[in-house]
Image (tube, grey):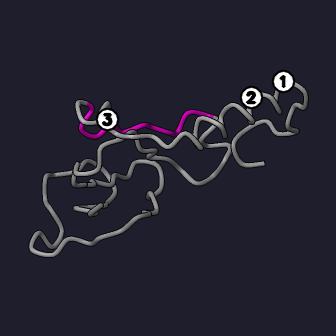
Amino acid sequence: MSVLATGVGAWDGTITNPSNPQRRDTQQILPFGGFAVFQFDADNPGVWPFHCHIAWHVSGGLYVNIMERPDDIVNIDIPSSLAQTCHEWGTFTNTSVPNQIDSGE
Protein backbone atom coordinates (compact mmCIF):
# COMPACT_ATOMS: atom_id res chain seq x y z
CA MET A 1 0.00 0.00 0.00
CA SER A 2 1.10 3.56 -0.45
CA VAL A 3 0.63 6.34 2.06
CA LEU A 4 -0.49 9.34 0.02
CA ALA A 5 -0.86 11.82 2.87
CA THR A 6 -1.06 12.15 6.65
CA GLY A 7 -1.79 15.15 8.79
CA VAL A 8 -3.93 16.88 11.37
CA GLY A 9 -7.32 18.36 10.51
CA ALA A 10 -9.16 17.79 7.25
CA TRP A 11 -7.34 16.41 4.20
CA ASP A 12 -7.10 19.11 1.51
CA GLY A 13 -6.53 16.68 -1.36
CA THR A 14 -2.77 17.18 -1.50
CA ILE A 15 -0.72 14.04 -2.13
CA THR A 16 2.70 14.03 -0.49
CA ASN A 17 5.43 13.17 -3.01
CA PRO A 18 3.06 11.97 -5.78
CA SER A 19 5.90 10.75 -8.03
CA ASN A 20 7.16 8.36 -5.33
CA PRO A 21 4.67 7.92 -2.46
CA GLN A 22 5.78 6.15 0.68
CA ARG A 23 5.23 2.38 0.44
CA ARG A 24 4.31 0.68 3.72
CA ASP A 25 2.57 -2.34 5.17
CA THR A 26 1.89 -0.51 8.43
CA GLN A 27 1.17 3.10 9.31
CA GLN A 28 0.91 4.88 12.62
CA ILE A 29 -2.31 6.86 12.80
CA LEU A 30 -1.96 10.35 14.14
CA PRO A 31 -3.68 11.69 17.27
CA PHE A 32 -7.40 12.44 17.34
CA GLY A 33 -8.37 14.77 14.54
CA GLY A 34 -5.76 13.48 12.13
CA PHE A 35 -6.03 11.65 8.84
CA ALA A 36 -4.17 9.12 6.74
CA VAL A 37 -4.85 8.59 3.02
CA PHE A 38 -3.91 5.20 1.57
CA GLN A 39 -3.82 3.69 -1.89
CA PHE A 40 -3.44 0.02 -2.70
CA ASP A 41 -3.43 -2.03 -5.90
CA ALA A 42 -6.46 -4.31 -6.03
CA ASP A 43 -4.55 -7.09 -7.80
CA ASN A 44 -4.84 -9.94 -5.30
CA PRO A 45 -8.34 -11.48 -5.15
CA GLY A 46 -9.56 -12.21 -1.65
CA VAL A 47 -10.81 -10.67 1.56
CA TRP A 48 -8.03 -8.91 3.42
CA PRO A 49 -7.96 -7.47 6.95
CA PHE A 50 -7.26 -3.78 7.43
CA HIS A 51 -6.86 -3.33 11.14
CA CYS A 52 -5.17 -1.93 14.15
CA HIS A 53 -2.60 -4.21 15.76
CA ILE A 54 -3.84 -3.51 19.27
CA ALA A 55 -6.08 -6.46 20.10
CA TRP A 56 -8.69 -4.60 22.15
CA HIS A 57 -9.02 -2.06 19.33
CA VAL A 58 -9.88 -4.91 16.95
CA SER A 59 -12.44 -6.34 19.36
CA GLY A 60 -13.84 -2.81 19.73
CA GLY A 61 -14.52 -2.56 16.00
CA LEU A 62 -11.41 -0.88 14.58
CA TYR A 63 -11.23 -3.49 11.84
CA VAL A 64 -12.37 -3.55 8.24
CA ASN A 65 -12.35 -6.29 5.62
CA ILE A 66 -11.37 -5.14 2.14
CA MET A 67 -12.70 -7.36 -0.63
CA GLU A 68 -10.58 -7.28 -3.77
CA ARG A 69 -11.96 -8.52 -7.08
CA PRO A 70 -14.96 -10.41 -5.67
CA ASP A 71 -15.85 -11.97 -9.04
CA ASP A 72 -12.45 -13.69 -9.08
CA ILE A 73 -12.69 -15.07 -5.53
CA VAL A 74 -15.02 -17.89 -6.60
CA ASN A 75 -12.27 -19.18 -8.92
CA ILE A 76 -9.66 -19.53 -6.16
CA ASP A 77 -8.77 -23.12 -5.29
CA ILE A 78 -8.69 -23.19 -1.48
CA PRO A 79 -6.56 -26.07 -0.15
CA SER A 80 -8.52 -28.70 1.77
CA SER A 81 -6.04 -28.33 4.65
CA LEU A 82 -7.67 -24.97 5.44
CA ALA A 83 -11.08 -26.59 5.77
CA GLN A 84 -9.53 -29.23 8.03
CA THR A 85 -8.02 -26.51 10.23
CA CYS A 86 -11.43 -24.85 10.59
CA HIS A 87 -13.02 -28.20 11.44
CA GLU A 88 -10.38 -28.98 14.08
CA TRP A 89 -10.72 -25.51 15.63
CA GLY A 90 -14.49 -25.93 15.79
CA THR A 91 -14.10 -29.31 17.49
CA PHE A 92 -11.61 -27.86 19.99
CA THR A 93 -13.72 -24.84 20.88
CA ASN A 94 -16.79 -27.03 21.44
CA THR A 95 -14.92 -28.80 24.25
CA SER A 96 -12.40 -26.19 25.45
CA VAL A 97 -13.20 -22.50 25.61
CA PRO A 98 -10.01 -20.47 25.00
CA ASN A 99 -9.29 -18.11 27.89
CA GLN A 100 -9.36 -14.88 25.92
CA ILE A 101 -11.78 -12.04 25.43
CA ASP A 102 -10.48 -10.82 22.08
CA SER A 103 -8.09 -11.64 19.27
CA GLY A 104 -4.93 -10.73 21.11
CA GLU A 105 -4.71 -12.51 24.43
Q: Is residue 43 magenta?
A: no
In this view, the residue in front, 30 or 94, is: 94
Query: Mark 2 touching mark 1, by CB under 8 A?
Result: yes
**Quarter holding residue 39:** bottom left
Tag 3–tag 1 contact (CB < 8 Å): no
Q: Residue at x 44, y 57 (%)?
A: 29
> From mark 3 to mark 1, how far is it between C-alphas?
30 Å
Secondary structure beneath disc 1?
helix
Amino acid beneath label 2: Gly
- Local packing at callout 3 (Cα closer than 10 Å; few below 14, some 14-19, many 20+) is some
The residue under the point 36% across, 41% down is: 46
- Left or right of 62? Residue 88 is right
* Position of residue 13 measured from the top left corner of the image (x, y, whole percent): 13, 52
Q: Which residue is denoted by mark 2 in the rendering?
A: 90
Q: Is residue 25 left or right of residue 5?
A: right
What x and y, as percent, mark residue 4? Answer: 22, 62
Relative to residue 105, is residue 72 depicted above or below? above
Residue segment shown in magenta: 60-70
The earlier-in-sequence mark between 3 and 1 is: 3
Q: Earlier in the sequence, mark 2 or mark 3?
A: 3
Question: Pointer 2: residues within 10 angstroms few (<14), some, or many (20+)?
Answer: few
Locate the N terminus by quadrant.
bottom left
Instruction: Locate residue 27 relative to residue 1 in the image: left or right.
Output: right
Residue 94 - label = 1
Q: Residue at x 44, y 63 (%)?
A: 26
Rounded to the nearest angstrom, the CA distance separating label 2 from label 1 is 6 Å
For badge 1, the amino acid type reads Asn
When the figure is inspected, residue 15 is found, relative to residue 21, above or below; the finding is above
Residue 73 badge: 3
